[in-house]
Amino acid sequence: MNGIKAEDFRKLFRRLTTGVTLIAVDGENGPAGMTVNSLTPVSLDPPLLLFCASASSATAKRIATIGAFSVNILAGHQQDVSMHHAGRPLATPTWCWRESHGVPWIDGANAVFRCRFVEEYPGGDHRILIGQIEEMFGPETAATPLLYHGGQYARLPYEDGDVANVPRTEDLWWTG
Ligand SMILES: Cc1cc2nc3c(=O)[nH]c(=O)nc-3n(C[C@H](O)[C@H](O)[C@H](O)COP(=O)(O)O)c2cc1C
């Protein structure tokens, strides 16, 4: 690894706090998906986003076959959704699937982006998948989000519904 140790790479990137998303796809036996924190908005015109998926990801392979997926930005109360789709399945799912144009999405998410799979690029042991947003929606008021920091789940110190009222220390200058 060119002198870069995997343990150091992981240790330092654990300091990058992120939200948590569920990438959902119409699987062979109903809705399927994977937990992802590598989501990035890419372009407004056309509306594009990307995420990185391990070369071994079953979800990414399915997306390439089906050609469509959804991105669901998870709320703080959806940790079980995240764990289930990150290789720690629950015996009894507690969430509710919905569907739009044949693409599954998850009830209770803070935002949902239904995408057409447009392209993928190699990225070392991962693949970079690009989706074009065809539909997007979310609740009027976002719940406190699910975060990932230091290798564990975290929450903002605000209750659901209060996030919009957090005092701003500066103007919103970048909305990308
Ligand atoms: C918070 C969190 C974020 C994750 N982000 C990614 C990611 O961005 N890309 C990735 O390939 N795997 C990521 N994973 C791991 C996948 O969710 C996990 O390997 C999953 O089981 C892959 O499922 P699949 O093989 O069915 O697609 C993440 C896991 C967690 C808990």
Image (spheres, rainbow, N blue to C red):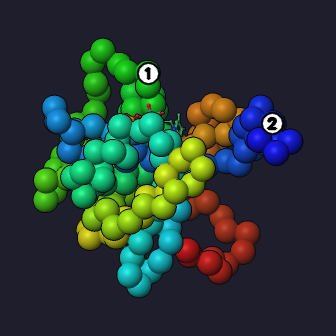
Q: 139 or 165: nearer the eye?
A: 139
Q: Secondary structure at mark 2?
A: loop
For mark 1, what is the residue?
88
Question: Image point 28% across, 24% down: which residue?
Answer: 93
Q: Secondary structure at mark 1?
A: loop
Question: Image point 33% across, 67% down: which residue?
Answer: 118
Total marks shown come to: 2
Disc ID at residue 5: 2
Q: Residues within 10 Å of mark 1 (few under 14, many from 20)?
A: few
The x and y percentages for residue 124 are 60, 50
Q: Residue furthest front?
A: 2
Q: Residues within 10 Å of mark 2 (few under 14, many from 20)?
A: few
Mark 2 CB near ligand 1 (8 Å cut): no
171 to 90, vertically: above or below = below
Residue depth check, mark 2 versus mark 1: number of the one nearer the observer: 2
The x and y percentages for residue 39 are 51, 56
Mark 1 CB near ligand 1 (8 Å cut): no
43 to 147, vertically: above or below = below
Dot 2 or dot 1, earlier in sequence? 2
Q: Amino acid at mark 2?
A: Lys
Q: Residue furthest bottom?
A: 45
Q: 167 or 172: nearer the eye?
A: 172
Apparent side of residue 99 relative to residue 13 in the rendered image (left or right): left
Apparent side of residue 97 relative to residue 76 in the rendered image (left or right): left
Q: Amino acid at mark 1?
A: Arg
Q: 157 or 109: nearer the eye?
A: 109
The x and y percentages for residue 99 are 16, 50
Question: Image point 28% across, 65% down: which residue?
Answer: 116
On-image quarter of the N terminus: top right
Apparent side of residue 166 relative to residue 20 in the rendered image (left or right): right
Asked whether the viewer can see residue 72, the reply is: yes
The x and y percentages for residue 8 are 81, 37
